[in-house]
Amino acid sequence: MEQGNKPWLKFKILKWGLACLGLILSTFLAINYYQNEKQRFKSNLNLKAERAVAKIDSNLRIYETLITQTLAFFVTIKKVDSYYFNSYYQNLKNISRFYGIQGMGFTKYVKKNELKEFLAEARKEFPHYEIWPFSDKDEYFPVLYLQPLVDAIGFDQSSEEKRKQAFKSALKSKDTTISGKINFVQEKDVSYKSPGFLLLRPVYFDQEKKDLSGIIFAPFLYQEFFENIWEDFSDNFYFKVYEGPEAEDKFLIYSNKKSKDKGNEIIINKNIKIYGVDFHIDFYPKDINRNIFQTATLIFLLGLSCTLIVLKILTDTIRRAELSSINETYLKESLRARDEFISLASHELKTPLTSLKLRAQLSARKLKHENIDPKMIKDFATEIVKQVDRLERLVNDILDFSRIRTGNLSLQPQRYNLSSSIDEIINRMSSQFNEINYPSFLKPVTEIYVHWDKLRIEQVMTNLLTNAIKYGKNSPIKIEMEEKKNGDVVISVHDQGMGIDPRFKETIFNRFERAGISPNEISGLGLGLYITYQIVTSHKGKIWVDSELGKGSAFHIKIPKNPRF
Ligand code: ADP
């Protein structure tokens, strides 16, 4: 088996190499896809973010056009009253299109010395017109016209610090400007604060821009203004807008990012300056990672599946090839063993047959000459019985071998006295021993009764004793028998003969194994220990050998007294 595996080792290494390659490739493709897509998404988002910024800018430019148009209206009409202003405002086509614009208004510029005159003039149109909150000042910026009409008429815009600053910069630039964040006062009594900004444009009636009439203003609510911008990008991202160069909570003026969307990382931010005011915008992508991650995982799993399929095909192919190669090796081995067996068996059978034939020829010759010597006849008969015994043993071994191979070695266990049975065997074999090697049998005082197949165990003992004679070089043979506490019985057969080369200590129990001994040296089929091993193991027992080359061997068998068959 081991040897059969070797030629396929390189294919197996190749297979695992391919598997690793597949795994690495799948991981690489998935990571590569993930990174590329993320990069692509980022640049796409960057593009979109730039478009959003451009939209903010262009929307404000449109509003500026509206303011400029209103300026033209004031400069052209010169004597604008609330009626003109209202109908102008009503005629502004599609004003609702400019989402976020809250309306349009005009704040009059009033110096302290013109106050009386201004109030008198204003009260012609609005009988209850008042400047509020009122205090003694050098100049006032009260709201004179406002559409749609909310209760802010008369509100002095310079009374609020932020507006005052915004007005100041508007007057300084003399052009359209944007205020910073302000809170709109919607009603006289209640200050309803909603954050927004104002687009401002001073109105001068002279070319040199010295004669300031007032300031046109358009209020915007941040919420509506940015919502309108966001509509186009709502599929792509959320954003937070800060009025300032950095993302500080106190500068936050708009956010459409819900707290549940918190997990998204900011991947893009932009700073813009509109009419001199800094804005910082953070863009939060929507679901980017999940989609890309899912596809990347899919790519990885696909790669993995392909790898596994290839692996499975390769494994099957190698296994099939391996099997057929093993079968081939096994077949070759079987054929070799068969040939070896035929040659061994014929040699083994030939020896006693030749001997029998010779004896028979000799007998015939002697009988012809009527030269019959009874002693000679007795010797001949003894020799014939010996050779026939040998033939019988050979044939029995071959028969047993065939039974083992076909699984037909059946056991017939019975209860019997073990030491008596061993005594019988020694007796039966007595003619094969001589004075030196006649076995000494060491046994316990108490009898041991076992439940084994008597004939088969006798066969085992006969085999071990025959070997002790064959390979014992006429040395003393000793049989030992003892019962262990756990109920196992150990029988050992010792000789002091040729011993066994350690290399063959395990293999001598294999069929046809002769531990390097040629049949010409000592005859044998190499089946005895194989059959012995099979009988012992089928009794749930063990067999092993202690041996030293040139010093002798001790074969031990250990079998439970009552094995469970
Ligand atoms: P066989 O005796 O027909 O060769 P066995 O299966 O009985 O077959 O023995 C296998 C081999 O084990 C023998 O050929 C011999 O080399 C070795 N062997 C068996 N018994 C002994 C022993 N008592 N001393 C030395 N070698 C032995």
Image (spheres, grey):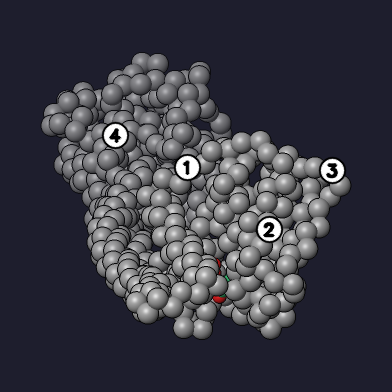
CA gap, disc 1 to disc 2?
Answer: 25 Å
Asked whether disc 4 touches disc 3, contact meaning CB atoms under 8 Å apart, the reply is no
Which badge, 2 or 3, is on the more N-terminal residue? 2
Horizontal side of 241 relative to 66 (left or right) equals right
Front-most of residues 211 and 559? 559
CA gap, disc 1 to disc 4?
Answer: 107 Å
Against 352, residue 393 (above or below) is above
Circle 4 SS class: loop
Q: Quadrant of residue 200?
A: top left
Asked whether disc 2 touches disc 3, contact meaning CB atoms under 8 Å apart, the reply is no
Residue 150: percent from left, percent from top? 35, 21
Foreground mark, 4 or 3, reads 3
Residue 503: percent from left, percent from top? 58, 78
For disc 3, the marked residue is 446
Circle 1 SS class: loop
Residue type at numbered disc 2? Ile
Q: Residues within 10 Å of mark 4 (few under 14, many from 20)?
A: many
Front-most of residues 86 and 210? 86
Horizontal side of 529 relative to 157 (left or right) equals right
* Residue located at (31% from left, 21% from top): 149
Which residue appears farthest toward the front when viewing the image?
370
Residue 16 visible in rendering: yes
For disc 4, the marked residue is 101
Against 340, residue 249 (above or below) is above
CA gap, disc 1 to disc 3?
Answer: 30 Å
Foreground mark, 2 or 3, reads 2
Q: Quadrant of residue 197?
A: top left
For disc 2, the marked residue is 426
Residue 106 visible in rendering: no
For disc 1, the marked residue is 410
Circle 3 SS class: loop
Residue type at numbered disc 3? Thr
